[in-house]
Image: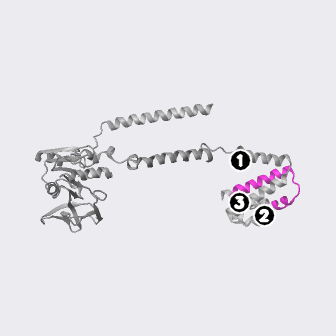
Amino acid sequence: MQKKRLKQKTWIGLSLFLIVLLFSRYILVQDQLKEYPIFASDSPSPTGVKAFYTYLEKSKESVKRWSESPSDLSTTSENQLLIMLEPYFIPTTEELGAYKEFMNSGNTILLFKQNPKGMFELETEPVDTNEGHIVDKADHAYSAELLESFRLLEQTDDKILLSDDLGTIALQRTYGKGSLIVANSPSWMMNSELLTDDHLALILSLVNQVNSETILFDEYIHSSDSASTFFTIYPRWFLLLLVQGTLLTLLWLWAFGKRFGPIFIPREETVRFSDEGLRALAAWYLKGRRYHDSLVIQAEYVKTLLHERWRIPYTMEWENLTDHFKQKCPHLHKDEIREMLMGLTPMLSKEKVSKQDYLYWSKKLETIRKEVEMR
């Protein structure tokens, strides 16, 4: 009963502690600045791209944010530019197909991604990062930070737009009536990096590759809700088989497996190896007046300890252990040591031992045991 009350009090105290912790966290976080996701077009933070978005709003006719699925992109209009900036996830096959259909209809996608491998059949190769000079297709030189450790692998029909000594940085690939422009340096467009070196000029050179009437910033690829989940990656028949297999496994474990729940140790094992068992065994020896057997067992146990702790052979006689005890136990008087060890052998060789002798030598053996365990 008392244990149940103590358990209830523990749970109540833990619940109150968690409530206070959550309430204090709410108060502390309430006044913090709003956190924006990286590469978001509405983010004024150093990792956002609101500066470039605002720049295009003032210099272009129509600039919008696109948060819908790629399947909703218009395929009846032409000369649209969709800017995809460092997607948080690789779109599914269906979504990539919708993007390709958008380009085949006469529109352009400008993809900025550090390593675009896995999207639109693009391939890359790893290189050493560096800060150097970039040249465009007209051999105009630019200065920029190149922190990306990948370069694009172009195909025969691709047009190289930007490159350096290590490889291709940006290329253009035709898709039907439209095209795909890929660059591996999304960090150029960040608010904190836009005006560094020639980043703005490089970005504008890519944007101006096509004369687009409408520019869309793809925010669908920055939404965690748009990312593929476990239930959207795998087909329904596979998920159904997985659920059925899990249920069958649980039923099999329930029928043939080990029981779930706490493990209770049988009382006989606890009694056998606990103080209760030792006390019962000692009482049996005392009631049966088996004093000699009890002393022999104690002495054998001490001999085992001497072998384990002091590396003394088990067969060595007690009277030959005097020098070992003098060395290991300098605080004991040598006469006391000699008395204990010299008297043990004749006592253990007796057939019958009185109760007084048993109590006396049992204490001596206990003293020796403690000395051995302490050293």
Q: Residue at x 18, y 50 (%)?
A: 81
Residue behind mark 3:
305
Tell me if residue 352 is in the magenta stretch.
yes
Q: Is residue 58 above or below residue 166?
A: above
Residue at 86% across / 48% down in the picture? Answer: 288
How far apart marks 1 and 2 lie (CA) works out to 35 Å
State left or right for residue 261 relative to residue 266: left
Compared to residue 128, the image places residue 258 above or below, namely above
Tell me the CA gap for discs 1 and 3.
25 Å
Label of residue 269 in the image: 1
Q: What segment is highlighted magenta in the picture?
A: 343-372
| SS for callout 1 | helix
Crowding at mark 2 (Cα within 10 Å: few <14, some 14-19, many 20+): some
* Quadrant (top left/top right/bottom left/bottom right) for the N terminus: top right
Looking at the rendered structure, the secondary structure element under dot 2 is helix
Q: In the image shown, does 72 or 146 lie closer to the viewer?
A: 72
How far apart in space, not on screen, are marks 3 and 2 (Cα)?
A: 13 Å
Q: Which of disc 2 and disc 1 is earlier in sequence?
A: 1
Answer whether residue 89 is visible to the viewer in this image. Answer: no
Q: What residue would you read off at disc 2?
A: 318
